[in-house]
Amino acid sequence: MTNERDAARRSATVIDLDRAATTPVHPDVLAAMLPWFSASAGNPSSLHGAGRAARRAVEDAREHVAAALEATPRQVVFTSGATEALHLAVLGSLALRPGAHVVASAAEHAALLEAVRTAARRGHPVTWVPSEPDGRIAHHALVAALRDDTALVAVMRTNNETGVQNDLAPLREHFEARGVRVLVDAVQSFGLERVGLEPCGADLLVVSSHKVEGPKGCGVLLLGDGVAVEPQQRGGGQERGLRGGTVDVPAVVGFGRAALRSTTWRERSARVSALRDRFQHGVCAIGGVTVHGSGAPRGPKHVHVHVGEIDGETLLINLDREGVLASAGSACAAGSLEPSHVLRAMGRSEAVARASVRFSLGDHLDEATIDEAVLRVRRAVRTTRGLEGAA
């Protein structure tokens, strides 16, 4: 009987509560991309008609992304994704300031952490700033970490695991006065809130296509006026010499169309926030569940919870059997046996970090699906606690 019940659960409609990891390509985005794989497959660097058409498509997409980010097209640098964009921002900035000091949040995405660690290996001293217990980076801690030789501060806008938001805009004038550039990873914010250099208090800003129903393999580094970076990938001089390599026209076109859709972020944010609150209320009613970062401002889609009396990995397996997609934290840390560095930076114990699961929502959901998801999560928790079949 148990095997039949498990089989029925596995065959149930899958509920995707892992939208912080990635999103499916929207049909409108896919339709815009398809011609550039075949009939219109010109190289945008070529001078003939097909090349000029591809170049126009790339520049149209650049305009769409720039408009969505309250920027000018010239400020938009296309990359292969947020990871490359973050490395270009960090290493490209510091290449112009040999030996300069870096300040970074200890709760950043793995891509940023690795970029900063690479800088450290190249002789740049680094100060890692831990999070407050609620997940935010204290402004006074950032200011205290600055030195006379500090060149770069890196703090993400919306944390990819907890959804906790950092607002660096109030420190903008202070950083400018010290000659410090500010890098903001806005990957988890784009499409759900106002994102741009000014609202994020940034000189350099990074977003990614596949988090907003665009294709994987395309990201953007947005550069403020007068901000220079040293190219980290040289070749044919593409992207104004900042990123060599033939432009992936279909991916760029797809990002442009996805960026057009992201301009409805206010409506989407309100809808997802309401669904998030409904889901969070239902999950917390299970008992023994606490929400990381619940006392801080959070983006609308994240619910990162600690579930008492469980092993997180086992819970994820049981959630998968129930047809619920979730994760232990960052998708980029999949397969890692280490507890979440984000939760550890917030002062959580290793045991708490290992018993935590991230759910992340999107506007593909409705209230009925959320209620069904809560029921499945409840069953998965009971199974993990060894209570399945108990009264």
Image: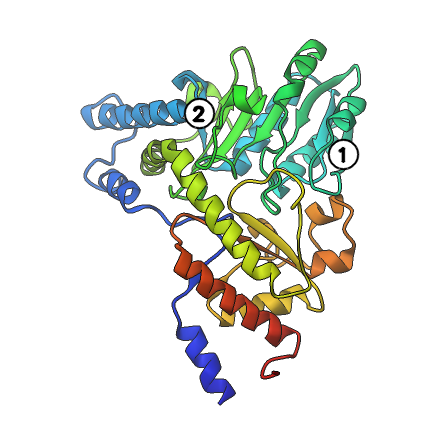
**Residue 352: x, y in percent?**
74, 58
**Residue 168: x, y in percent?**
63, 25
Rendered residue at 40%/54% (across/down): 365
Rendered residue at 40%/48% (across/down): 363
**Residue 316: x, y in percent?**
58, 65
Q: Residues within 10 Å of mark 2 (few under 14, many from 20)?
A: many
At numbered mark 2, what does the secondary structure look like: helix, strand or loop? loop
**Residue 252: x, y in percent?**
36, 33
Q: Nearer the viewer, residue 28 or 113?
A: 28
Q: Nearer the viewer, mark 1 or mark 2?
A: 2
Q: Are marks 1 and 2 in contact (CB under 8 Å)?
A: no
At numbered mark 1, what does the secondary structure look like: helix, strand or loop? strand
Q: Earlier in the sequence, mark 1 or mark 2?
A: 2
Residue picked out by circle 2: 69
Direction from residue 147 to residue 116 in the image, left or right: left
Direction from residue 97 to residue 83 in the image, left or right: left
Rendered residue at 39%/37% (across/down): 267
Tally of marks: 2
Depicted 242 relative to depicted 135: above or below: above
Q: Residues within 10 Å of mark 1 (few under 14, many from 20)?
A: some
Residue type at mark 1: give it: Trp
Depicted 60 relative to depicted 360: above or below: above
Q: Nearer the viewer, residue 117 or 155?
A: 155
Residue picked out by circle 1: 128
* Quarter residue 353 falls in: bottom right
Direction from residue 187 to residue 55 in the image, left or right: left
Residue type at mark 2: give it: Leu
Rendered image: mark on residue 46? none
Quadrant location of the C terminus in the rendered image: bottom right
